[in-house]
């Protein structure tokens, strides 16, 4: 090959550079979506079954013995919370297991070697986690509508809160997937962070029933704002401002996204 | 992007690497000319993989400078990732996807369009005898096949510089013959190839230029014939494992 040819082929490289800037990002997002879809029986269906069980137990058996909250039956009141649990858990599991596995078997190196920027890499993993979270969320909503005629007050707000909640926990999952040295580390974060936040975030009760000091504490729990948004999307009621809930969740999500990009930039647990 | 012919494919100067307190690379200087077939020869633990990973940005350097076709590695990740194709020493193939899909996703990471990608995949997979395995999961395949897949993956985006970290490891003699012949052809067509090995015979059969790496230091560097005669005449003390069963390749 002459030097002229070399220069030509290099400028061809340069052309692909600008043209295909985002093609790699879409490819990585799709690959990570396909990954969880190939394991549907492990990723998508279990949360659906557990939510259906919740609905049956609380809706049909126990719910009748619990008084209505804000004019809704108990099951209706907690459905947004059950929804949030499935969505956040799935987004978290998706991101943390992708990152953990990719570090474990070193396939992450190929992604690091590719032309994608750190922002694109992190965004692709996050998108995959949002898709998994929202997909599970939509299926849970369908189950709610079919089993207990769950209303949908505002599909747009419902979808919006499904997405930002999944993003927050997707980004959090990336951080934990990077940090974890064993699978158990991931489980520890689920048991000691995700689950307690969910249960204490007003999923199973109305904050108006709480003593004032617990009410204040609740305001520090990000899950409270997510469940509030979902509850508005479904039932049309909310305990705090929807815009405020949205902005707080968005701020948290962007902060976590920024942290994950930073962790990739410094090669945290990725580069020795 | 206009790269003059004079610029080296790879230029390393004063490169150090510490792993904690362990001094793995002790100030390496290296120039690989464009279009050459370069061998980095050294025993296990000499620091070959460490050097390669730093060139590709997979390992952080402690000190020094690395330029690929004139681009400083630290600051031009995107350009350099398109210029380099790396086949790592350790297999790292995604267990989830069948071979064909795995390679297709990989190609698309580089933004290769569908048509060109199909063409490249057909060509490379037949070249390496992988076509009939395209629907298999890679972890079911033998080491020799995994090595071929690693090579195809490195070549898929048609990089200017091909870097192969111990490509002969775990490969039987027949594949080695094919592989060596193919690499020579690629080099003749203009690709710069950098290869690490702990077999003198491999470097001798393939490379134009050789650098000897020992315990993180380059102790000798130059044209193949000089290096080989010095090594064979025991003019330098350099430990290498037993000779490799050598295919003869024209
Ligand atoms: N991640 C790491 N942490 C600590 N030491 C390492 C690491 N990677 C390599 N080393 C050490 O650095 C030296 C060079 O390793 P390596 O570059 O893999 O050698 P080679 O590829 O020539 O066999 C070896 O002594 C090895 O044990
Ligand atoms: Mg090595």
Image (tube, rainbow, N blue to C red):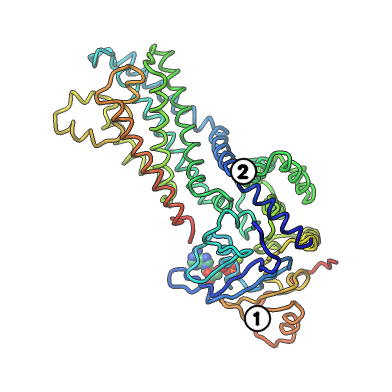
On the question of residue B173 being in view, the answer is no
Point out the frontmost of discs 1 and 2. Answer: 2
Q: Is residue A184 above or below residue B11?
A: above
Mark 2 within 8 Å of ligand 2, using the beta carbon: no
The structure residue drawn at horizontal position 41% and vertical position 21%, both measured from the top left corner, is A156
Quadrant position of the N terminus of chain A in the picture = bottom right
In the image shown, does A249 or A54 lie closer to the viewer?
A: A249
Q: Is residue B1 above or below residue A175?
A: below
Rendering quarter of residue B199: bottom right
Outermost residue toward the left?
A: A212
Do the CB atoms of the residues marked 1 and 2 lie less than 8 Å apart? no
| Residue topped by disc 1 | B220
Q: Residues within 10 Å of mark 1 (few under 14, many from 20)?
A: some
The structure residue drawn at horizontal position 28% and vertical position 17%, both measured from the top left corner, is A74
- Numbered disc 1: secondary structure: strand
Could you say where residue A268 lies in the image, as x and y percent from the top left?
Answer: 43, 55
Exactly how many numbered labels are in the figure? 2
Q: Classify residue B176 as left or right of residue A158.
A: right
| Residue topped by disc 2 | A20
Could you say where residue A58 lies in the image, as x and y percent from the top left?
Answer: 32, 18
Could you say where residue B145 lies in the image, as x and y percent from the top left?
Answer: 71, 52
- Numbered disc 2: secondary structure: loop
In the image shown, does A259 or B77 lie closer to the viewer?
A: B77
Q: Is residue B177 above or below residue B140?
A: below
């Amino acid at each position: 090959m002459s030097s002229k040819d070399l220069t030509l082929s290099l400028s061809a490289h340069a052309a692909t550079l600008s043209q295909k800037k985002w093609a790699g990002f879409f490819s990585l997002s799709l690959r990570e979506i396909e990954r969880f879809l190939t394991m549907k029986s492990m990723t998508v269906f279990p949360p659906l079954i557990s939510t259906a069980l919740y609905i049956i137990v609380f809706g049909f058996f126990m719910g009748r013995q619990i008084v209505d909250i804000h004019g809704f039956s108990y099951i209706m009141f907690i459905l947004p919370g059950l929804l949030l649990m499935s969505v956040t858990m799935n987004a978290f599991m998706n991101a943390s297991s992708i990152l953990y596995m990719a570090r474990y078997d070193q396939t992450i190196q190929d992604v690091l070697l590719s032309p994608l920027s750190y922002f694109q890499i992190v965004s692709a993993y996050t998108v995959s986690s949002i898709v998994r979270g929202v997909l599970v969320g939509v299926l849970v909503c369908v189950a709610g509508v079919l089993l207990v005629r769950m209303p949908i007050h505002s599909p747009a707000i419902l979808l919006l809160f499904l997405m930002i909640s999944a993003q927050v926990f997707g980004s959090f999952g990336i951080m934990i997937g990077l940090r974890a040295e064993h699978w158990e580390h991931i489980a520890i974060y689920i048991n000691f962070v995700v689950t307690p936040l969910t249960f204490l975030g007003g999923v199973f009760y109305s904050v108006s029933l709480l003593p004032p000091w617990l009410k204040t504490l609740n305001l520090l729990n990000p899950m409270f704002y997510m469940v509030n948004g979902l509850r508005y999307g479904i039932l049309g009621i909310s305990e705090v401002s929807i815009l405020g809930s949205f902005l707080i969740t968005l701020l948290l999500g962007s902060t976590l996204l920024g942290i994950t990009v930073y962790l990739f930039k410094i090669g945290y647990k990725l580069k020795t | 992007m206009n790269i003059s012919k004079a610029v080296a494919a790879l230029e390393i100067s004063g490169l150090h690497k510490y792993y904690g307190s362990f001094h793995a690379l002790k100030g390496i200087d290296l120039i690989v000319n464009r279009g050459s077939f370069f061998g980095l020869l050294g025993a296990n633990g000499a620091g070959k993989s460490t050097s390669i990973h730093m060139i590709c940005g997979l390992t952080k350097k402690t000190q020094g400078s690395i330029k690929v076709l004139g681009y400083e590695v630290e600051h031009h990740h995107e350009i350099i990732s398109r210029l380099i194709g790396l086949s790592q020493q350790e297999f790292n193939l995604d267990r989830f996807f069948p071979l064909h899909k795995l390679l297709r996703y990989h190609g698309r990471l580089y933004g290769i369009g569908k048509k060109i990608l199909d063409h490249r995949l057909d060509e490379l997979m037949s070249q390496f005898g992988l076509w009939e395995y395209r629907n298999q999961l890679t972890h079911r395949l033998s080491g020799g096949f995994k090595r071929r897949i690693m090579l195809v993956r490195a070549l898929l985006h048609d990089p200017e510089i091909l870097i192969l970290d111990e490509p002969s490891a775990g490969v039987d003699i027949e594949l080695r013959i094919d592989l060596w012949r193919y690499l020579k052809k690629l080099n003749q067509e203009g690709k710069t190839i950098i290869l690490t090995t702990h077999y003198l015979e491999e470097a001798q059969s393939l490379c134009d230029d050789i650098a000897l790496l020992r315990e993180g230091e380059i102790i000798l560097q130059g044209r193949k014939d000089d290096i080989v005669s010095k090594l064979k005449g025991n003019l330098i003390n350099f430990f290498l494992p037993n000779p490799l069963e050598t295919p003869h390749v024209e």
